[in-house]
Image: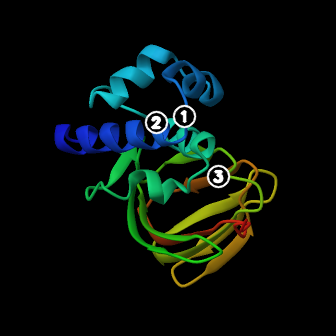
Amino acid sequence: MDHLALGTLGQHLQRLRQERGLSLSQLAAAAGIAKSNLSRLEQGNGNPTLDTIWRLAVQLNVPFGTLVAPITVPLGEDGVQVRLIDQGQGSRQVDAYWMRCAPHTDRHAEGHTPGATESLTVLSGELDAGPEDDLRTLHAGDTLAFSADRPHRYRTGEQWATLILTIVYAERKTS
């Protein structure tokens, strides 16, 4: 992530944290990261992993896409690039992402918020994907949907895989 994107993410993260009345210490502890790392991230420094950003989104009770929406460049690490395409608005939040995985990538993803489901459609290449205990091999044109509130995985072989990933979050309760 470039310096501008990091600064944008940091400002947005700080605003969301403050809107929820959380201190740096409270959010860092809940997300399982060091307070100093969270502070650096809010200042636009550091190099957060995708899992760190996911954990922060979960603790802030916002979809991942809401946390990264201001960033227009792909986020990436360890052979995986992800870019938010669009977000639906309604009682059920829907995030759509473009995702690309390099050859020989084995990405373990933490579970999303309770009740979240994920749908993958492979555009090119092939990969094994799904819940850790039920991986499926997908080829270009294949789609897989699964409960994403538990750990899941994306694993490529000899070639790149490009996919559209959609996350549908549990219905929001209205007061």
Contact? badges 2 and 1 (CB < 8 Å): yes
Task: Identify which amino acid the numbered label 1 is placed on.
Answer: Gly
Q: Is disc 2 placed on a helix, strand or loop?
A: helix
Q: Can you see residue 16?
A: yes
Find residue 5 and report its horizontal and vertical position in percent: 24, 45
* Tag 1 residue: 21
Mark closer to the observer (3, 1):
1
Residue ID at (76%, 55%): 114
**Mark closer to the chain start, 3 or 1:** 1
Q: How far apart are marks 2 and 1 (CA)?
A: 5 Å
Tag of residue 153: 3
Find residue 1 and report its horizontal and vertical position in percent: 27, 42
Locate residue 32: give its quadrant: top right
**Mark closer to the chain start, 3 or 2:** 2
Between 68 and 144, the residue placed more toward the observer is 68
Contact? badges 3 and 2 (CB < 8 Å): no
Find residue 119 and report its horizontal and vertical position in percent: 63, 73
Q: Is disc 3 placed on a helix, strand or loop?
A: strand
Q: Can you see residue 1?
A: no
